[in-house]
Amino acid sequence: MQMNGCSVISLNYNFDYSQFHKPELQNKAKNTLGEFFSFVRSTFDALIETGRVLQDLYYDCLAFCPKGKKVFEEWLKSDDFGASRYIAKSAMEIYLWFNKLAPKVQNLLRQNVQNWSVSALRQLTKVSHDLVKELVRGGKKTALEVKQEGEREKENSSQLAVGNGLCSPALTQLTGNSGAIRW
């Protein structure tokens, strides 16, 4: 059987789905969990779509379920998700970030990061848009490589700010050219 292009798998539920209050939300949560586990090949597009579906359920919980935020968070923490909760939370975070990007950057990502790890993609959300473009054009990166490039970018921008006189004279005296406060 197929659902949204993914194979449906049989799941045992441990979470008390009646907490979602409405039968429609209970079914939506169960279907969302099933679709989450159904994608076998975790491509960037599948991750974005999964993030969208999870975020949509989260918003529905906030709108229609008493204590919706708590119920959703408990659902993510439940044994139904197990070790996959990191991927679920990451998918939501990456989806929200991706939606804020310019369409050209979105297309660049779609063309270049299909086989990147979830951890590397999550690190991309923490760097500037210019660095995102540079990194994805340079080929597949690990989470550590993206993180290190992000740290270099921060160091360079703080050194640039000090070197270009963008810091106050008092701060420059305290920090010197390194940007680090000397005691």
Image (cartoon, helix red, strand yellow):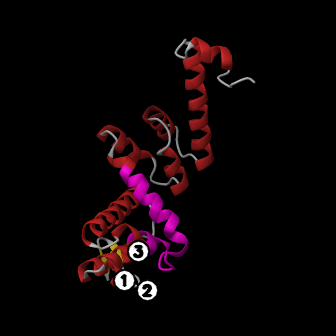
Query: Where, by quadrant of the figure, is residue 119 drawn?
Result: bottom right
- Per the rendering, the mark at residue 13 is 2
* Mark in the foreground, 3 or 1: 1
At which x and y percent is residue 112?
A: 44, 46
Give SS at disc 1: helix
- Per the rendering, the mark at residue 44 is none
38 left or right, relative to 123: left
- Per the rendering, the mark at residue 38 is 3
Q: Residue at x 58, y 24 (%)?
A: 158
As measured in the structure, the alpha-carbon distance from the residue carrying label 3 to the one carrying label 1 is: 20 Å
Q: Residues within 10 Å of mark 3 (few under 14, many from 20)?
A: some
At which x and y percent is residue 67?
A: 35, 71
At which x and y percent is residue 75?
A: 43, 75
Q: Residue at x 31, y 39 (%)?
A: 102
Give SS at disc 3: helix
Give the main secondary structure, helix, strand or loop, of the magenta stretch.
helix
Residue 177, compared with residue 78, is above or below; it is above
At which x and y percent is residue 33?
A: 39, 75
- First along the sequence among labels 2 and 3: 2
As measured in the structure, the alpha-carbon distance from the residue carrying label 2 to the one carrying label 3 is: 15 Å
For this orientation, the residue located farthest to the right is: 183
Kind of residue indicated by mark 2 = Tyr
Q: Residue at x 49, y 44 (%)?
A: 124
Range drawn in magenta:
72-96
Give SS at disc 2: loop
Kind of residue indicated by mark 3 = Ser
Q: Nearer the viewer, residue 171 or 59?
A: 171
Question: Can residue 177 be seen here?
Answer: no
